């Protein structure tokens, strides 16, 4: 739901010891691996705690900072367009996606024990007067986003960070960019699937 925080998950304490059932134990192990890996891809469902204090080199740390700032900037741009022009597509859809991307980075920062940078972009972005011009800004933002992630993928080695960069690059390239391109030629027809 929009605007409401999801309630904290209820903790169930129905532990029953497994009696010599290796198959059930293996299923539990697989379920744990899936839940842990999904916490990175779908952080709203499984928020991470500071699980790792793995030292990252300064270049990788800066890539994480640049990534969350890029998501903050895009979210601020898309919110500013909505404030100025109304709840128009594709901005009204994609801004929700940007919120998910910010949450992904917040969880990864926690995972690596790094402080999350503040959002300094909200309320500080100027937008044009027309939807077509705003869509052009969206195109430029998503193209820059893809280039940024291509650069980061050339040196980041951590599997979870590579997965995040790859996923976000794909969403920008295959979903957001085409929506903004459609919006440039057919305003109010930029709908699509956004994650």
Image (cartoon, rainbow, N blue to C red):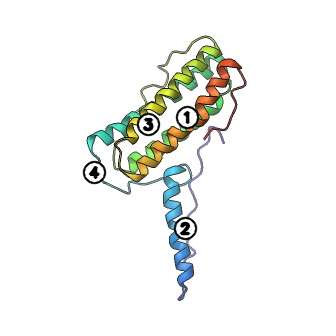
Cβ atoms at labels 4 and 3 below 8 Å apart: no
Q: Mark 2 or mark 4: which comes first in sequence?
A: 2
- Residue, disc 2: 31
- Secondary element under disc 3, as helix, strand or loop, is helix
Percent of width and height locating residue 17: 53, 83
Rounded to the nearest angstrom, the CA distance separating label 2 from label 3 is: 30 Å
Rounded to the nearest angstrom, the CA distance separating label 2 from label 4 is: 28 Å
Rounded to the nearest angstrom, the CA distance separating label 4 from label 1 is: 30 Å
Q: Give the vertical position of 52 relative to 19 (above or below).
A: above
Q: Nearer the viewer, mark 4 or mark 3?
A: 3
Residue nearer the viewer, 9 or 51: 51
Percent of width and height locating residue 59: 29, 39
Q: Mark 4 or mark 3: which comes first in sequence?
A: 4
Badge 1 density bin: few <14, some 14–19, many ≥20, Cα 10 Å: some
- Secondary element under disc 2, as helix, strand or loop, is helix
The quadrant in which the C terminus is found is top right
Residue drawn at x 48%, y 25% as measured from the top left = 122
Residue 122 appears in the picture as rendered: yes
Badge 4 density bin: few <14, some 14–19, many ≥20, Cα 10 Å: few
- Residue, disc 4: 55
Q: Mark 2 or mark 3: which comes first in sequence?
A: 2
Q: Nearer the viewer, mark 2 or mark 3?
A: 3
Task: Pick out the residue farthest to the top.
Answer: 129
- Residue, disc 1: 173
Cβ atoms at labels 4 and 1 below 8 Å apart: no
- Residue, disc 3: 149
Q: Mark 3 or mark 1: which comes first in sequence?
A: 3
Q: Mark 4 or mark 1: which comes first in sequence?
A: 4
Cβ atoms at labels 2 and 3 below 8 Å apart: no
């Amino acid at each position: 739901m929009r605007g409401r925080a999801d309630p904290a998950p209820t903790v169930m304490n129905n532990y029953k010891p497994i009696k010599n059932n290796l198959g059930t134990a293996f299923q539990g192990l697989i379920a744990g691996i899936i839940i842990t890996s999904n916490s990175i891809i779908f952080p709203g469902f499984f928020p991470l705690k500071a699980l790792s204090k793995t030292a990252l080199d300064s270049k990788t740390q800066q890539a994480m900072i640049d990534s969350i700032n890029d998501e903050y900037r895009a979210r601020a741009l898309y919110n500013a367009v909505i404030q100025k022009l109304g709840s128009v597509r594709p901005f009204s859809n994609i801004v929700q996606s940007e919120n998910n991307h910010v949450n992904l980075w917040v969880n990864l920062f926690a995972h690596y024990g790094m402080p999350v940078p503040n959002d300094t972009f909200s309320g500080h972005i100027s937008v044009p007067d027309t939807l077509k011009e705003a869509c052009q800004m969206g195109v430029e933002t998503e193209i820059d986003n893809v280039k940024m992630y291509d650069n980061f993928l050339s040196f980041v080695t951590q599997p979870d960070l590579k997965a995040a960069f790859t996923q976000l690059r794909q969403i920008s390239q295959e979903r957001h960019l085409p929506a903004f391109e459609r919006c440039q030629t057919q305003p109010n027809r930029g709908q699509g699937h956004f994650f």
